[in-house]
């Protein structure tokens, strides 16, 4: 059972970056909530925890200590940038393990790809920094900086669909890194609650059975060939 620790950057007495009517701590809360929900809905074989469930004040060391004490397998800290720049970047520690670098690679790609569905997002690169949550954690750890709160990026940060897509991309990246099994999708049923079975043996040519199954599906009647 894989253990995932999410860190919502800032919180409580520390709002993080503030601009354009937005607060970093609120945005990181939303992104992580979307990530956790997406994992629960789509994957199995994991447990997940978060440094703050609401608007608590936590030190950087407390965040790392919580993940270490639990024995987490990955740690992802979510942030919003400031400084009037634009785009997305991710960080590992300067002495990052190969596992941290691998986690950064998959997360960076997933998140940037999701962001670019909303426009031409600048890739600011995969970087390294001596951040406390990366230095003090004992497991593969990555910190993401998801656009700039004090630039034109704020338009996207005000878009709930964008925040949801970014959160879900974080989840997919972690799931890929850990190799989490996907949940089986419930078998589709038609509006009348029936699943139609097309029997190959009833046709001289299998292609006829396939054609009928396709016609049923096109009309909204899920069908399988047996």
Image (cartoon, helix red, strand yellow):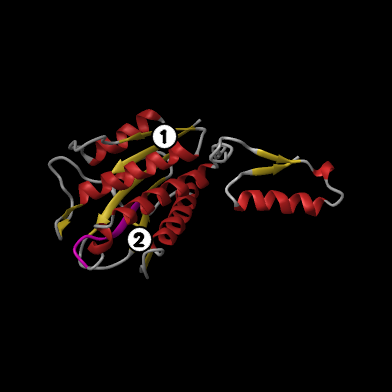
Between residue 33 and residue 85, name the one nearer to us. Answer: 33
Q: Is residue 146 magenta?
A: yes
- Work out whether 77 lies above or below 63: below
Kindly identify which residue carries mark 1.
72
Kindly identify which residue carries mark 2.
89
Q: Indicate the quadrant containing the C terminus: top left, top right, bottom left or bottom right.
A: top right
Image mark for residue 52: none
Residue 35 seen:
yes
Image coords of residue 103 (percent x, y)? 46, 49
Image coords of residue 179 (percent x, y)? 55, 42
Tell me: 16 left or right of 47: left
Q: CA distance from mark 2 to mark 1?
A: 23 Å
Image coords of residue 175 (percent x, y)? 49, 44
Q: Residue at x 41, y 63 (%)?
A: 117
Between residue 202 and residue 146, name the one nearer to us. Answer: 202
Q: Residue at x 48, y 54 (%)?
A: 106
- Work out whether 170 lies above or below 122: above
Q: Is residue 23 magenta?
A: no
Q: Residue at x 42, y 51 (%)?
A: 169
């Amino acid at each position: 059972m894989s253990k995932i620790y999410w860190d919502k950057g800032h919180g409580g007495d520390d709002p993080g970056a503030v601009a354009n009517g937005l607060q970093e701590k609120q945005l990181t809360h939303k992104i992580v909530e979307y990530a956790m929900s997406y994992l629960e809905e789509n994957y199995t074989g994991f447990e997940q925890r978060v440094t703050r469930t609401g608007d608590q004040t936590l030190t950087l060391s407390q965040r790392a200590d919580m993940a270490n004490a639990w024995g987490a397998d990955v740690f992802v800290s979510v942030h919003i940038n400031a400084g009037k720049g634009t785009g997305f970047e991710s960080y590992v520690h300067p002495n990052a393990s190969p596992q941290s670098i691998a986690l950064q690679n998959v997360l960076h790609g997933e998140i940037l790809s999701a962001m670019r569905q909303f426009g031409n997002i600048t890739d600011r690169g995969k970087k390294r920094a001596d951040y406390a949550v990366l230095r003090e954690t004992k497991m593969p750890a990555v910190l993401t900086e998801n656009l700039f709160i004090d630039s034109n990026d704020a338009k996207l940060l005000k878009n709930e669909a964008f925040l949801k897509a970014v959160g879900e991309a974080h989840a997919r990246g972690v799931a890929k890194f850990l190799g989490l099994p996907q949940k089986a999708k419930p078998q589709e049923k038609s509006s009348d609650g029936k699943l139609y079975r097309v029997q190959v043996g009833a046709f001289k040519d299998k292609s006829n059975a396939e054609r009928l199954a396709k016609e049923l599906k096109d009309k909204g009647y899920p069908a399988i060939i047996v």
